[in-house]
Image (cartoon, grey):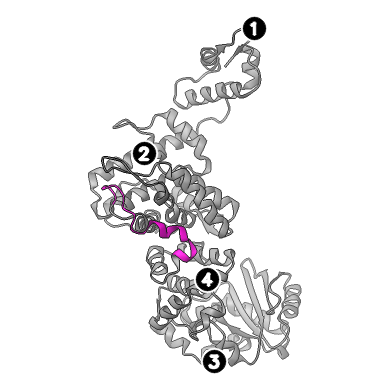
Amino acid sequence: MVSAAMSKPSAGSGVSGVPGRLSPDTISLVRRLIPLIDDSLEPYAVGGFLRDAILGRETRDLDLTVSGDAIAAAGRLAQDLGGTLVPLDTDRGIARVAFQQPGVAWNVDIASLHGDRLHDLARRDFTIDAMTVPLQALAGQDWPAEVTDPFKGRKDLEQKVVRAVDQNAFMEDGIRLLRAVRLAAVLDFTIDEDTQGHIRRDVSALDAVSGERVRDELLAILATSNALKHVYLLDHLGLLCRVVPELEQGRGVTQPREHYWDVFTHNVETVGAVEGLLERTWQPQWVLDDVAWSDDLDTHFRQIIADGHTRGTILKLTGLLHDIAKPVTRTVEEDGRIRFLGHSDQGARMASAVLNRLRLSKRASNLIETVIEHHLRPAQMSQGTELATPRAVHRYLRSAGDAAVDILYLNLADYLAARGSRLERDEWSDYTAMVTHILHTSQVQKEAPPSRLVDGNDLIRALGLDPGPDLGRVLELIAEARAAGEISTADEALALARNAIVPQPGSPKGTA
């Protein structure tokens, strides 16, 4: 199955995949750490590592608490391991040590206890993360028997429930609101009903959370293979439009009759359509039968593009935002026709503001904005039953750049999310044929010899052109003609250039 989620740890790393049993690599790491951390610090494993170890999930992160100065302990550990010290929260005494063990990247997060261990566990977010065990115990096979579990986290793990330790957990740290949904998405758990009520009550706590932390949780939710379900859960809990208020404007905004959903639901459903296309899970199967797919495309969407996430995950976020400007561009003609003129350009600008708030990387932001700006382009390149010409595809590649393939697949997802249950097979086959033609023509043009038939100096010498924009325009005309298969030699390129020159009155030289 094709996954748009983040890359998983390689085989042999993390825990064993067997509940309650650590892998040899993890045991080796624990045994390496034990003599390096002073016994007087009483190091205990806690949090996500322990939760995942009990579940048998792979992980490369170890969370420890110590009775003392965690920053100093992390500094010594980084030196002993030849790793890197990363202070995470100096006020609260939390630091990370990043290092290799051997050939596998590990992170060890160390936090200072504030009060006794029971007090520390009581201040944690969810019961499944509020367990602890001595680091020393992890070196033996019977370590699960030594786990301290005052809030019945193991029972919640068995019942697959995310439950807050305390009803005030979300006001203490608003990011926990999103983390609850992220844990439910990653683990395929449900959120306890009382906890859902506390989330809705305390949703305003999210306003105080930094954009970076919100971004990380949102992308982690989108990176899962059941992102659509959990985007709807975010909305159900009042979180989605707290993160992206602009989406709220689309709720209840009707669209032309070919659209099954209102604008808001269409944006959300596009996340699911991207997911279904890239992970090859869409039903009915005949939808996927008509969509071009290959190992190269799989690799393309698995590529880590920014912020530790793949193109596939970034494309899900793009789908969520792609029609964000429809409400502000909506008009109704005298004949009742609904139009959204300019919504793709305006949408790119609105998305830019959203992504800036979320502190998304420049590379990811540029990709999303480009895809939104051009997401209607594939359908506009064909005329009736006529498929896009090689010249049109060349122009598309020139303007789309690195986003060309991503645009095509968002366009397909947009079509699926527009039609909904009204999708007809013949109609879909015709549409995918149009997009596949653009994809294949693009691949042919990208594989063409990169060298130019003529360059600027050739045109200056042969035709007396002056350097400047006109010279660039003629070179582009030559490139388009070559892409279209209309010319293939330098002489033909020069002949085309001569025909493109318009003499300027009073000038002895020809200019384009």
Mark 3 and mark 4 lie on one chain; the one further toward the N terminus is 3
Q: Residue at x 43, y 42 (%)?
A: 342
Mark 1 and mark 3 lie on one chain; the one further toward the N terminus is 3
Which residue matches tag 4?
206
Quarter location, residue 262: bottom left
Q: Which of these two is toward me, 132 or 221?
A: 221
Mark 4 and mark 1 lie on one chain; the one further toward the N terminus is 4
- Asked if residue 237 is among those painted magenta in the image, a careful observer would answer no
Which residue matches tag 1?
508
Against 451, is 358 above or below?
below
Q: Nearer the viewer, mark 4 or mark 1?
A: 4
Left or right, 51 with respect to 62, comes to left
Which residue matches tag 3?
148
Mark 2 and mark 3 lie on one chain; the one further toward the N terminus is 3
- Asked if residue 257 is among those painted magenta in the image, a careful observer would answer yes
CA separation in Å, label 1 and label 2: 45 Å
